[in-house]
Image (cartoon, grey):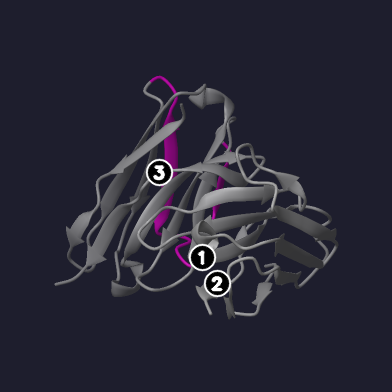
Amino acid sequence: QVQLVESGGGVVQPGRSLTLSCAASGFSFRGYGMHWVRQAPGKGLEWVAGIHHDGKEFYGDSLKGRLSISRDNSKSTLYLQISSLRGDDTALYYCARGDRSFFDFWGQGTPVTVSA
Amino acid sequence: DIQMTQSPSSLSASLGDRVTITCRASQAISIWLAWYQQKPGKAPRSLIYAASDLQSGVPSRFSGSGSGTEFTLTITSLQPEDFATYYCQQYHSYPLTFGGGTKVEVK
């Protein structure tokens, strides 16, 4: 079955960088677009970034310029690097499989807390 | 960017009720709309894509309709496991955007 397992979250000081990972299994990873969606505490869902199966990258407006999404098809792993972290980046970051850019499977999320 | 507006933001309903949630897009998105269900402490779950196609394994009491700028999610005969927050999402164009959510609570 499809499994997405995020890792790499934690408590980070403002201004630092962080790389999140999402290990995928149960499907042909190289054939799917993949995305990151975040949810701040008590708030709604916000799309962060996506990468198509062909490697084309897309970014949301709120973190533009501070993000880099990438994928390693040989490892079936998705990555998200966030730089210059700020307090309002505190959120649960979900990895999601993007079949035609809607999200048919989601991981359980990795929490990121930005705090001094 | 395409703005997605859901209404209501919350509603109270009883078991067996018919519930309708509306999602409006700030510009036409054809049928490129998805619906998700999220329970507290859990990841979202895909319910509907392409405005009206039911995701595999989703009960038939869930249905979606609409095209262009106005969409609805309907739950016929609300069940205990349906109390949750529901989100719409457009995938007509980037950046992908979600509605603000509708919390369905017990009356």
Q: Which residues are magenta?
A: A56-74
- According to the picture, the residue beneath numbered tag 2 turns out to be B104
Tell me if mark 3 has few (under 14), some (14-19) or many (20+) residues whose alpha carbon lies within 10 angstroms of its own. many
Q: From mark 2 to mark 3, how far is it between C-alphas?
A: 23 Å
Chain designation of label 1: B
| Three-letter code for the amino acid on which mark 2 is drawn | Val
- According to the picture, the residue beneath numbered tag 3 turns out to be A107
As rendered, which of A39 and A86 lies closer to the eye?
A39
Q: Are marks 2 and 3 in contact (CB under 8 Å)?
A: no
Tell me if mark 1 has few (under 14), some (14-19) or many (20+) residues whose alpha carbon lies within 10 angstroms of its own. many
Q: How many marks?
A: 3
As rendered, which of B41 and A31 lies closer to the eye?
B41
Q: Is residue B48 above or below residue B105?
A: above
Q: Are marks 2 and 1 in contact (CB under 8 Å)?
A: yes
Q: Is residue A73 left or right of residue B74?
A: left
- According to the picture, the residue beneath numbered tag 1 turns out to be B83
Is residue A14 at least partly visible in the picture? yes
Q: Is residue A44 above or below residue A105?
A: below
Q: Which mark is residue B31?
A: none
